Amino acid sequence: MNEAPILHAEDLTVTFPSRGGPLRVVDNVSFSLGQEKLGIVGESGSGKSMTARALLGLVPLPGQVTAQRIHYRAQDLQALSPAAYRALRGTKLSMILQDPKFSLNPVQRVGHQIAESFRLHDRASRKEAKEQALDMLARVRIAHPARVFHQYPHEISGGMGQRVMIAMMLATKPDVLIADEPTSALDVTVRRQILDVLDALIADNNTALIFISHDLNLVAQFCDRVLVMYRGRIVETLPAHALHASQHPYTRGLVESLPQLDDRRRRLPTLDRARL
Ligand SMILES: Nc1ncnc2c1ncn2[C@@H]1O[C@H](COP(=O)(O)OP(=O)(O)OP(=O)(O)O)[C@@H](O)[C@H]1O
Ligand SMILES: [Mg+2]
């Protein structure tokens, strides 16, 4: 990467108090995000979501974040007031969190939440914003946009919630989008379509993407570069297309535990931690 990074984290650490002393759930992680699609993979509990939350200033208490540096372009994010961070999150840095239901406002109809984003960012009139929101719902393949527009978050399925989140986050035309398992609740058939939509929208807006997923095949196809996390650390950084050919024992373990359609083995191999 020759250009200055868009996001840059150095020695990022997240700890939670525990009986045995502070637990380092993210442990001295350093990386930069350029104008790219950066995947983060790793088993459950490896610290993917906490890394994302730390970048966004959203680590829940009693979690503590420390770092040598967390920069968004020229801005030092550790120096931001909570209000300034919130303002940045609503505009330049957007996120799709792992459970979309918690990210949508439960007492506002979903269409209004998307329309609001257009009103804020494009200074659209009420009517224009509604049209743009309906169009966005259609683009994320929601079958009855006009009906869903008037529904509340608890009335829609998890998969629809993820699509609504994608629509809402992209309505703000963010500089950086952090998407944590954005398609995990979607059927395989819809997933590819939604990713194509996401891809087109981030390309239109020049949005840099951090894409967190369990799905190695998906990341290998969709992203440019991948960070592999294990126990709070980055164990490997590699081009996405090289994921399946990785020589790193942990990455190999992840790749080998992928179920293969043509695989006759009954049991999935487990990671051999003694090799790590
Ligand atoms: N509120 C909390 N208090 C204490 N520990 C927590 C808290 N939230 C998460 N953790 C711990 O932090 C570690 C990292 O969690 P994180 O959610 O980042 O994992 P992840 O890689 O996103 O996993 P998954 O793939 O299941 O989403 C885990 O061991 C988890 O148990
Ligand atoms: Mg997670």
Image (spheres, grey):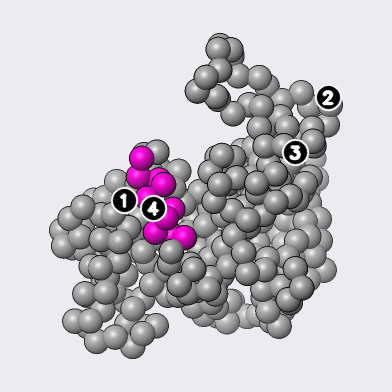
Give the quarter of the image for residue 73.
bottom right
Q: What amino acid is labelled 4 in the image?
A: Ile
From the viewer's side, name the closer residue of 183 and 53: 183
Q: Quadrant of the C terminus?
A: top right
Q: Tell me how far mark 1 sits from mark 2, CA to CA.
A: 41 Å
Q: What amino acid is labelled 3 in the image?
A: Ser
On screen, 209 above or below 43? below
Q: Of the numbered discs in the image, which one, if any, rests on residue 194? A: 4
Q: Earlier in the sequence, mark 3 or mark 4?
A: 4
Q: What amino acid is labelled 2 in the image?
A: Ala
Residue at coordinates 37% horizontally, 50% vertically from top-left? 193
Q: Of the numbered discs in the image, which one, if any, rests on residue 160? A: 1
Of marks 1 and 3, the one in the foreground: 3
Give the quarter of the image for residue 114.
bottom left
Q: Quadrant of the N terminus?
A: bottom right
Q: Secondary structure at mark 2?
A: helix
Residue 12 placed where, x, y %?
76, 60
Q: Tell me how far mark 1 sits from mark 3, CA to CA.
A: 35 Å
Label 1 with label 3: CB-CB less than 8 Å: no
On screen, 185 above or below 51? above
Residue 234 placed where, x, y %?
76, 49
Q: Of the numbered discs in the image, which one, if any, rests on residue 274? A: 2
Residue 192 included in the magenta stretch of the image:
yes
Residue at image mark 3: 246
Q: Tell me how far mark 3 sits from mark 4, CA to CA.
A: 28 Å
**Magenta range:** 189-199
- Establish whether ligand 2 lies closer than 8 Å to the Cβ of label 1: no
Residue at coordinates 30% horizontally, 61% vertically from top-left? 139
Q: Secondary structure at mark 3?
A: loop
Residue at coordinates 49% horizontally, 78% vertically from top-left? 91
